[in-house]
Image: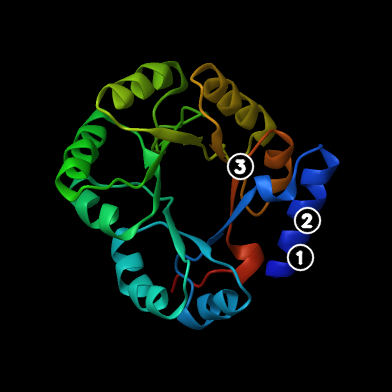
């Protein structure tokens, strides 16, 4: 499919629902992708990328950041507290704030480091035990807890259950965001990003449709 087609589809859907195409940020999910594929997408002009693991990103992105100006890196995978410092030094945006201990750690480190990445709270809209994210019923309290620590919550993120209609989960995330005065909505992946845009997504996370299927071997 490729980057150009994904950008066209984002713009088409945004216009269809009365939104400006530039109101949707495309995050190219480069996890487990070989460097040559990532470099090719960088050469096409893409600058916003998503990674799942701090270690993988640390081995890949410092060199790319030196070569390509304006790269913005988003952490879209679960963050262990002991990796928080490294994540905060490497990533521009963290999408997976999901528990008080992590919030406290990031608040402390932001004072130490003198800066803080932009922060999204991950909501487990499907209440799936195997998935990270705060439960929907606890989201308001957790957002308040983060704000009480001095953290600015820019957005919410979700990954709907694979077998359920995603629009219901996107609508739920939007409602939680609206009642908490939050504008950012990180939702929608390769298979459902147009549905997410119709529901108000500000960030869509697209990997395989840009890079091709991942090779986990």
The answer to whether residue 60 is above or below residue 174 is: below
Tell whether label 3 touches label 1 (CB within 8 Å). no
Counting from the top left corner in percent of width and height, residue 85 is at 20, 52
- For residue 202, the mark is 3
Question: What residue is drawn where x is 50% and y is 62%?
Answer: 49
Viewer-nearest of discs 2 and 3: 3
Please report whichever mark, 1 or 3, sits nearer to the chain's N-terminal start.
Answer: 1
Secondary element at image label 3: loop
Residue 196 left/right relative to 111: right
Secondary element at image label 2: helix
The answer to whether residue 127 is above or below residue 75 is: above
Question: What residue is drawn where x is 60% and y is 27%?
Answer: 174
Report the residue marked by disc 2: 9
Counting from the top left corner in percent of width and height, residue 159 is at 53, 40
Counting from the top left corner in percent of width and height, residue 105 is at 19, 38
CA–CA distance in space, label 1 to label 2? 6 Å
Q: Is residue 192 visible?
A: no
Report the residue marked by disc 1: 5
CA–CA distance in space, label 2 to label 3? 15 Å
Image quarter hosting the C terminus = bottom left
Nearer to the camera, 162 or 39? 39
CA–CA distance in space, label 1 to label 3? 18 Å
Neighbour tally class for label 2: few under 14, some 14-19, many 20 plus, Cα within 10 Å: some
Secondary element at image label 1: helix
Tell whether label 2 touches label 1 (CB within 8 Å). yes
Image quarter hosting the N terminus = bottom right
Tell whether label 3 touches label 2 (CB within 8 Å). no
């Amino acid at each position: 499919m490729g980057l150009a087609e994904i950008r066209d589809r984002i713009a088409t859907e945004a216009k269809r629902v009365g939104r400006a195409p530039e109101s949707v940020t495309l995050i190219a999910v480069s996890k487990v992708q070989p460097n040559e594929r990532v470099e090719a997408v960088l050469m096409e002009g893409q600058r916003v990328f998503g990674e799942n693991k701090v270690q993988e990103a640390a081995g890949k992105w410092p060199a790319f950041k030196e070569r390509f100006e304006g790269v913005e890196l988003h952490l879209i995978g679960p963050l262990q507290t002991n990796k928080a410092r490294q994540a905060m030094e490497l990533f521009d945006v963290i999408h997976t704030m999901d528990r008080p201990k992590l919030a406290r750690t990031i608040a402390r480190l932001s004072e130490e480091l003198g800066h803080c990445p932009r922060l999204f709270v991950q909501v487990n809209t499907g209440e799936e035990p195997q998935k990270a994210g705060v439960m929907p019923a606890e989201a308001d309290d957790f957002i308040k807890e983060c704000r009480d620590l001095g953290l600015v919550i820019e957005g919410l993120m979700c990954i709907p259950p694979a077998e359920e209609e995603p629009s219901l989960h996107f609508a739920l995330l939007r409602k939680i965001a609206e009642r908490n005065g939050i504008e950012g909505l990180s939702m929608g992946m390769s298979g459902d990003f147009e549905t997410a845009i119709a529901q108000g997504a500000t960030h869509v996370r697209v990997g395989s449709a840009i890079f091709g299927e991942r090779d986990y071997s």
